Image: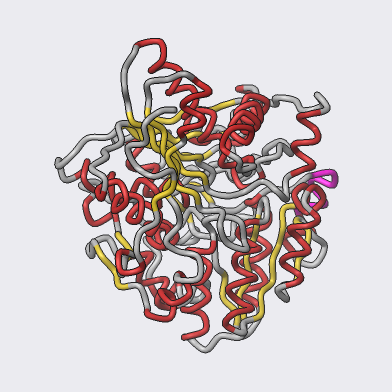
Amino acid sequence: MKKQEIPYKVYLEEQEMPRQWYNVRADMKNKPAPLLNPGTLQPMTAEELGGVFCEELVQQELDNEHPYIDIPEEVFDFYRMYRPSPLVRAYCLEEKLQTPAKIYYKFEGNNTSGSHKLNSAIAQAYYAKKQGLKGVTTETGAGQWGTALSMACAYLGLDCKVYMVKCSYEQKPFRREVMRTYGASVTPSPSPTTKIGQKILSEHPQTSGSLGCAISEAVEVATSTEGYRYVLGSVLNQVLLHQSVIGLETKAALDKYGVQPDIIIGCAGGGSNLGGLISPFMGEKLRGEKDYEFIAVEPASCPSFTRGKFAYDFCDTGMVCPLAKMYTLGSGFIPSADHAGGLRYHGMSSTLSQLYHDGYMKAVSVKQTSVFEAAESFARVEGILPAPESSHAIRVAIDEALKCKETGEEKTILFGLTGTGYFDMYAYEKFNDGKMGNYIPTDAELQMGFAGIPKFPGNEF
């Protein structure tokens, strides 16, 4: 047996849990570009954003200066239910691969929602409750965010309306039922219950939906219903802020044992888990204290980073949300109905997009079947069935470990295992039956999405 340098699982003591979120934007030389009002093309003001988001969340969204923001005591108390989450040394995977690399993963699936999404859901629900709101609306792709938010809202006594991407609504009925169990209403998107949904269905009657569609519907309902605000599970600065608990705990655990990762890997759809994992490490890199290699992994079917354009674009398909400067495939791009629903978004976090554009991290895209091959290999030796989204990070972690096997380098690899895949058995069934394909959009198909990116002075790409 290989001698263990640290325990298989490292749990921090409760007193070592972070009491503050880390805001990586404070250490960025080039700040993320501001959200723009689609009508005036001027930066959105706090007052304008307050019509959509909760007031304190707006302040967090706009804050580029303060590196640390206190976690409210009520939110911290909720975190204590399931945090700190374990950092795991993947000894069995290392043995299977016969690699000299050391592989660690931060496991965020040990809560009822089954993913990291609860970290931001409880924070956003708390601020809504504090503001005296009746409820919130949101979208969800694979269902992890909708599940997390419905749980947080049930805990705080808030109403929760979820618009779930249609293909995921059909593929993942049990996750839908968990949301309903927590009291949320769940509507497949696009739906005939909103004006935007009706428009999308009239133009694309057979569409499987997208996160962009669901966002449009959720925003429409929030802005037209008294006592409601919209909350988002990824992409926004405020969400990356809340998710920094992942990276802060990870860094504290590694520092406790004198371990420094060489490569840090996360799956990337909108950017919440990747941003949360890398934030404190990226801060060190930005300040010139340490160096790390960061890798964002996205599906080849929705390649925002690797094939997208860095430009201002709508965050939603209905074009009612502010414009964000990000790597985008165009708000009209509707990805294929693959099985990583949480990664089927046309754009990427403005914060991560700026970091990527400035060369602080790199990105790769991977095919769906290779992702599930990695997922099954991991499950068979590490004992956790991973979510399809997380499995993108597993795929590249394995690839990097195998490179070390070829070169003999003893690199330390860290990746984020953002959730479990026990509600994704339809996808595993397709893979096991050999019925899973690999859809990769053509340049012509991508160009159709790019054609819809707003054209105005300064937004050339």
Q: Position of residue 353 (x, y in %)?
A: 39, 42
Q: Say whether residue 204 is magenta.
A: yes
Image position of 430 (left or right of 137): right
Extreme-top residue of the structure: 406
The number of numbered discs placed on residues in the rendered structure image is 0
User: Which corner quadrant of the image does residue 14 belong to?
Assistant: bottom left
Q: Quadrant of the N terminus?
A: top left
- For the record, the magenta segment spans 200-207
Residue at left 54%, top 59%?
117
Front-lying residue, 117 or 5: 5
Q: How is the image coloured?
A: secondary structure
Residue at (78%, 64%) from the top-left corner?
177
Left or right, 396 with reference to 76: right
Q: Position of residue 265 (x, y in %)?
A: 42, 36
Residue 158 relative to residue 251: left or right: right
| Residue 152 visible in the current orientation | yes
Location of residue 134 with respect to 358 vertically, above or below: below
The residue at the point 51 percent across, 53 percent down is 108
